[in-house]
Image (cartoon, rainbow, N blue to C red):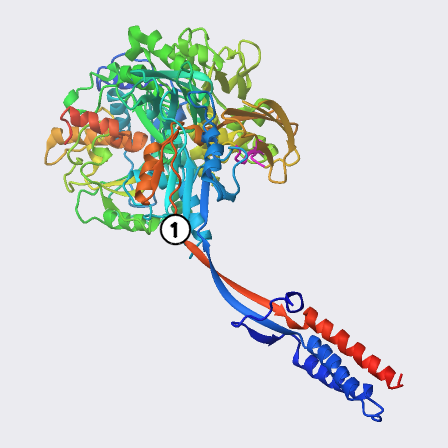
Amino acid sequence: MNFLFDSCCSTTGHLAWSAPTWVCILAVVGGLLAWAVSILPLRPVRYVESAAMALAVAAVIWALCGPEWVDDGERLEEGRLIVLVDGSRSMDVLEADGRPRSAAVASLLDRIGPAEVYTFGDRLRAGAPTAFLDGDTDLGGALDGITRKYAGERLGGIVVLSDGIDRGGLRKRLSTGAAVGEGAGAVSLNGPLTVYGIGDAQGRTDLAVDAVRAGSFAFLRAPFPMDVDVRAIGTIPAQVTVSLTRDGQPAGSAVAQLNERGEGTAHFSLNPDRAGRFLYEASVPLPAGDAVPANQQMGLAVQVVRDRVRVLQVCGSPSWDQKFLRLFLKEDPAVDLVSFFILRTSRDMNSGYSPDELSLIEFPYQNLFDRELSTFDLVIFQNFDYRPYFESRANELLGNVAAYVKNGGAFVMLGGDRSFDLGSYAGTPIADILPMRLGVEGGGVDERLVVPKLTESGARHPVTQLTGESSDNALAWAQLGPLDGVNTVVGAADGAAVLLEHPTLKAADGRPMPILAVSEVGKGRTMALTSDASWRWSFAGAGAGQGNQAYLRFWKGAMRWLIGDAADAPVTVETARENYGPGETATALVRVRSVAFSPLAGVSVEARLSGPEGEQTLQANTDADGTARFELPTQRRGAHRIRVRAVGAGLEDAAAETVYGVTSRDPELDQVEPDIEFLKALSAQAGGAFVPAGTWSPPLRDASAGRRVHERRVVELGLLPAVGVLFSVSASLAWLMRRRSGLR
Amino acid sequence: MHRRSFLAAIGAAGAVSMLPRRAWAFGGSGRVNVAEIQLATGTISRPEAWKRLLFETIQTTSVEASPEVAQLAPDDPKLFEHPFAVLCGDGALPALTQQAREQLVRYLSYGGFLLIDDASGTLHSDFDATVRRIIADLYPTRPLETLSADHSIYRSFFLLQEPAGRVQLSRVLEGVAHVSTHPLVYTRNDLSGALDRRADGSDRLPCTPGGEEQRREAIKLSINLLMYALTSNYKQDQAHVKELMREGRLE
């Protein structure tokens, strides 16, 4: 009977029809018609046959109408047990016994038993971890994710397996005394929490650079502090020597005194002597048995910028040349000008005025040329006679100027009756850095008016670019007013570039007398202009209605070139940031432009990359904006240098370089010591339990937790075997009775 | 003429005894000199006064000067060969032509310096009235302002308290500012009158009421004005102010 009726009809259920109403009506009408036809002819009366046929038809109608017996009900299931496993890289740190910390996870999962297991790192995902590779462990985020996923459901229990090295903020919040449910990203747990600590805090040795703290930029020649935090666990030394390098070259060392917690800071005071981008790396010695050798170094790229170009203008005699140069320098907001003009010499002392009547100060030459020299980007000697002041210290103080240039400073000597050979600079250290050779017998001057001639070098050099177009540039120089004579020199110095020359006067070497020349000396640059009348390029031009643009462009170009302004170079390379994290996207932009500052398209640019990944050479062409792009490697931590070279377009292999750092060491390995206190605090705040590593107790379960499951049981009555049996028997009986009555 | 020969000439005139000094400079026109601006009416020429200024400057300072005084019309392009110009007068000045006005504005904007000296010796002179009109014409949006007591002119070489001249009509200088300097300065005290002298070297006019002491202060002021034209606000540089204050010579 159970087979026939499928235990179908409980007393709590109800009947429902699954077929549409029209199907039911059609079935009934069709069934009645079929029955009526089947009992014809009406004589003889066949009661049994008619009844049997009626039952068969009724069975068909019943089946077609889709009757169902629906039984709705509920049942209670046991609360889920959720297990969160820390899948971060810190879980793979080797313990004192040489086994990875994560080895404890598998056995704990076995003992916990059936549960829904999730892995968390920087995100939450279902399943137990197969490898411990996650970074940025966010336990708070994982708990929050579970709470949201099972919102409205009371969980039987929540289990956390972790070493407590959380980087998502929960640890920080709890360390400040906040409750688990407080603050941004806080979690409100919907089940009892059991925390299993993973990892042993004892027996491990690790010495690490914890942080390098400094601004991402510093000002040139201004002290800037850099602090390096050091941390030791296990064997804690009293002090640690921290070494600092700049672009791989030693930049100093400092000692960090460690406290009882193994923490200390080394303080550096750096005084960058060059503008540009540099990578500073701090490192500590590697002790034997160090748990994480990778955290021994940490780097930081620093952009050294000029606040303002600091210029020292020393003038031996107030003149119109001095006046116009001062006006130019003083009105440029990017220039910090310090002027010293010699207003009175020893020869002017008998004019009948007492010193008290004068508003003069002593020329602080010793201070300037002994101590302050390195604070300037550019030093200008404008018709300055050093001898009355420097006296017996002349060689020493002028030597300081030469050394300052060789170390990256810039120096200009302008003409006049106290300059070059007239100022007895021959044989001094200054003569060694000038782009012109001194030694004209008895000093030298040519007082004839002269319009300087632009040389081939001058046509290309940024100092002498008065216009955007080179063809106009030569014309612009030719149209400038004449100079009131020049100092004569022996000739151009070796390696110097003569930019302007005398159209008729010859130097001792037989070549045209140089008037304007530049030179690179060591890391610095020098320029010599043998005239004291460049002011005429300003004032005469203004008088002619042409303004003073030629003068301004000349001096601006000279300033830029002298101080080595990278932005002034025909090829520049830069990255958007100084520092990148491992794996971040970094792009180098290389800009190529002509001497006339027009973007150069289609120029082949070769980039040589060197860094921890090794060396590689890339190639790209500039686009219409004169820009080429290179994707840079950031896989490995350390200093990366890019040297780019533009080929062709008359650039004569112009080159540039920069540096960037991949400095964010794997944060998961910044701290390798399990944070047991955090895990204890977490479980305490959540009212849960903490199970230390190496011990066991079952996870807390909420017996009352569970879920009511709604159930609906549907029996399709039309498909019950009994219906089929009824139809078969009735139809067969009707057929037999019809045959016996002689009908077919 | 070289500076050496100029000094020799002055020395021979018995004005002062001099120390021998080197006197190189390139091209005479490049050295410091004075241009007198002459108008059709109202201006007077006092070349000896300005030569005295140049001489005193050479004697007292390290400035290389040339004993040249050029008389130029305000629209003369040669004005741009002389960054230091004076306009001295005692009568009503005619209005400037458009060309002269434009050139003077350009001259003062690009680094030239103009000293205007009221030689009338009276408080309400026609010169003063017309000068103010001309200045207003040159600088419609910038006032002729009183220079403060700590202005660089009062300390560009000598420490001065107030402007002196042949007369003592005004205790202030006035000027028009451009960027951070005053390229136009106006004095009411007949400064050139205190400097002017005859061919034999004697003073042409007496200074009242202070006599020779007043003349001495006028000479000092004239040197300061020339030094200011050369060094502009150099004396306001922090290094100089701090040093003078440290020495107690400046409050």
Query: Which residue is rendered at x = 48% and y = 60% of the image?
Result: A75
- The residue wearing badge 1 is A703
Magenta span of residues: A583-598
Residue A218 in sight: yes
Element class at badge 1: loop
Position of B204 with respect to A455 (left or right) is left
Residue B198 in sight: no
In the rendered view, tell whether residue A104 sits above or below residue B14. below
Q: Nearer the viewer, residue B214 or B247?
A: B247
Q: Amino acid at mark 1?
A: Ala
Q: Label 1: few (<14), some or many (≥20) within 10 Å?
A: few
In the rendered view, tell whether residue A46 sits above or below residue A682. below
Q: Chain of mark 1?
A: A
Position of A78 with respect to B116 (left or right) is right
Position of A193 with respect to A708 (left or right) is left
User: Which x, y percent locates residue A295?
Assistant: 43, 23
Q: Residue furthest left?
A: B209
**The C terminus of chain B, quarter of image:** top left
User: Which x, y percent locates residue A82?
Assistant: 45, 45
